[in-house]
Structures are given as structure tokens and as C-alpha cells.
Image (cartoon, rainbow, N blue to C red):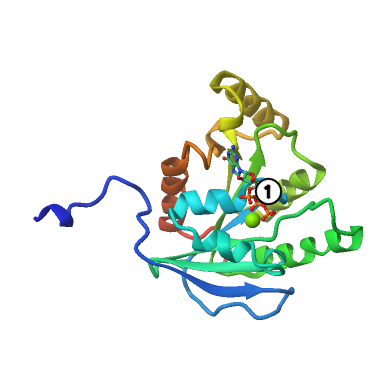
């Protein structure tokens, strides 16, 4: 076995990444694919693009999600022709109308209810903020659906390690989560990158939770 044939110890090594397009409305166009899907959800500005970029070590995800309009769509990225990362629109953006803010729900919920390939969701929370009503609604929706959910508490570098650990314990308890469900994350220091990548690999390898 040559050196390059050795399996890497790094989880989820990205060999290829392709943006396949965006879904703009419930039941609207989406890429046809049979790849297992992992969806990423969180309020606007929580650090979703930064987390996705840290996860795949690539900047094309950020470029797409900064394209005006694209951030209100569900964006699909194929990784290694083996799995699909699904970037859900950020909710709770303060500068849009109440009406506009209400649109995220049907789009996100219809995706979560109907995508047969969905293997799990990564829900992002900000270490410095208490979970918003919309964060709680989303987690309740996921719990009712029964979809495997990983919570990442991001921007951990914004606090001291002690303070971050205390905040994460508070957030975990206030949401009634198990500590094992929660991954501390930082796009700046890459804290949690490999743990999240391994958790995603495990979800993809496990049988689907969905009764088909
Ligand atoms: P929208 O797509 O606009 O809703 O935002 P988003 O959730 O994709 O957040 P984005 O990744 O664009 O990050 C928002 C801001 O937070 C940016 O200024 C980032 O640089 C910053 N940020 C994101 N993640 C981290 C992190 O882990 N640590 C620190 N210090 N800053 C972060
Ligand atoms: Mg973004």
C-alpha cells in the first residue's frame, strides 16, 4: 500500500464539490438526486455559511449564499458524488417585513417533510444568544418529525473557553437536549470541525430514519 492509498484520519475529506442549484418555493424545482442529504438550519447571521465553508474547506459555498436572492432559496451542494449538503434559508432576518419573515416556514417545512433522502439536520445556534422563538419552533418541528438532529453552538471563539462551556451547558439544558447532541463550533479556530464531519459521516452511513 503506497502512502497515498492510506485512509486519511480526517473525516469527510472533500474531493469534489458542486453547486447543483436552488429551490425557491415549496414543491418548486430542485435537483434530481438519490444522494443522502444533510440539511443546515439556523437564524440569519448565525454563521451558517462560515460553518459550511469550514466543513468543506472551500469558499464556493459562501459565494453562492452571498448572491442576492439565493439566500432565500434552499441551496444544494453535492460532495464527492456521495452526499448532498442542503443549505436552508436563514430565518429571522430583522430587516425584512413580517410577511417576508413568514415565508421561510412553508419552504423549509415542505423540504423537511418531503425529501426522501434527508438523513439528518444540523441546527446552528449562537453561543452568545439565547435560542429565539424561531429556533425553538424549528427544534420542536424536527423533534416531531423524528429527524436526527445535531445542534452546533457556533462562534465559540467569541467567549473564553470557560464561559463558552458554561453558555453551551445553559443552552443545552434550556432546550432539553442531551449533551451528546451538541457540538461546540468555531469557524475561526475550526473547533468542532472534525467532530461535526464525523457525526455527518455517521448519519450518512446509518439506515434512513424515514419510513418509506
Ligand atoms: P446569512 O446567510 O447572512 O443569514 O448569515 P450566515 O448564517 O451564513 O452567517 P455568516 O457565516 O455569513 O456569518 C455572519 C457573521 O458572523 C460574519 O461576520 C462572520 O464572519 C461571523 N462568524 C461566523 N462564524 C463565526 C465564528 O465561528 N467565529 C467568529 N468570531 N465569527 C463568526
Ligand atoms: Mg449565509
Looking at the figure, which quarter contains the C terminus? bottom right
58 left or right, relative to 172: left
Q: Secondary structure at mark 1?
A: helix
Residue that mark 1 sits on: 143
Most foreground residue, 116 or 199: 199
In percent of width and height, residue 108 lies at 71, 63
Q: In the rendered image, is residue 212 in sight?
A: no
Residue found at the very far left of the displayed protein: 1
Q: Quadrant of the N terminus?
A: bottom left
Q: Where residue 131 appears, x then y in whole percent?
A: 74, 38
The answer to which quarter of the image holds residue 193 is: top left
Question: With 212 as the anchor, is 72 left or right in this view?
Answer: right
Residue 113 coordinates in the image, percent (x, y) = 68, 65
Q: Residue at x 74, y 73 (%)?
A: 26
Badge 1 local density, few (<14 within 10 Å), some, or many (20+)?
Answer: few
Q: Is residue 162 depicted above or below 84 in this figure?
A: above
Residue 124 visible in rendering: yes
152 shown above or below 59:
above
Q: State which quadrant residue 160 falls in.
A: top right
Identified at 68% across, 50% down, the residue is 42
Q: Nearer the viewer, residue 93 or 119?
A: 93
Q: Is residue 198 left or right of residue 180?
A: left
Residue 146: x percent and y percent?
A: 64, 53
Amino acid at each position: 500500500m503506497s502512502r497515498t492509498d492510506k485512509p486519511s484520519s480526517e473525516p469527510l475529506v472533500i474531493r469534489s464539490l458542486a453547486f447543483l442549484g436552488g429551490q425557491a418555493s415549496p414543491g418548486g424545482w430542485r435537483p434530481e438526486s438519490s444522494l443522502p442529504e444533510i440539511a443546515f438550519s439556523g437564524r440569519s447571521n448565525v454563521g451558517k455559511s462560515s460553518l459550511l465553508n469550514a466543513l468543506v474547506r472551500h469558499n464556493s459555498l459562501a459565494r453562492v449564499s452571498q448572491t442576492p436572492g439565493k439566500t432565500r432559496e434552499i441551496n444544494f451542494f453535492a460532495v464527492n458524488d456521495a452526499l448532498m449538503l442542503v443549505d436552508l434559508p436563514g430565518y429571522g432576518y430583522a430587516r425584512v417585513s413580517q410577511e417576508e419573515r413568514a415565508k421561510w416556514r412553508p419552504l423549509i417545512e415542505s423540504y423537511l417533510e418531503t425529501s426522501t433522502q434527508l438523513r439528518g439536520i444540523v441546527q446552528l445556534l449562537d453561543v452568545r444568544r439565547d435560542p429565539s422563538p424561531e429556533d425553538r419552533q424549528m427544534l420542536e418541528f424536527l423533534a416531531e418529525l423524528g429527524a436526527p438532529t445535531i445542534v452546533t453552538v457556533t462562534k465559540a471563539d467569541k467567549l473564553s473557553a470557560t464561559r463558552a462551556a458554561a453558555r453551551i451547558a445553559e443552552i443545552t439544558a434550556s432546550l432539553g437536549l442531551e449533551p451528546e447532541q451538541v457540538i461546540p463550533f468555531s469557524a475561526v479556530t475550526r473547533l468542532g470541525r472534525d467532530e461535526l464531519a464525523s457525526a455527518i459521516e455517521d448519519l450518512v452511513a446509518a439506515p434512513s430514519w424515514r419510513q418509506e
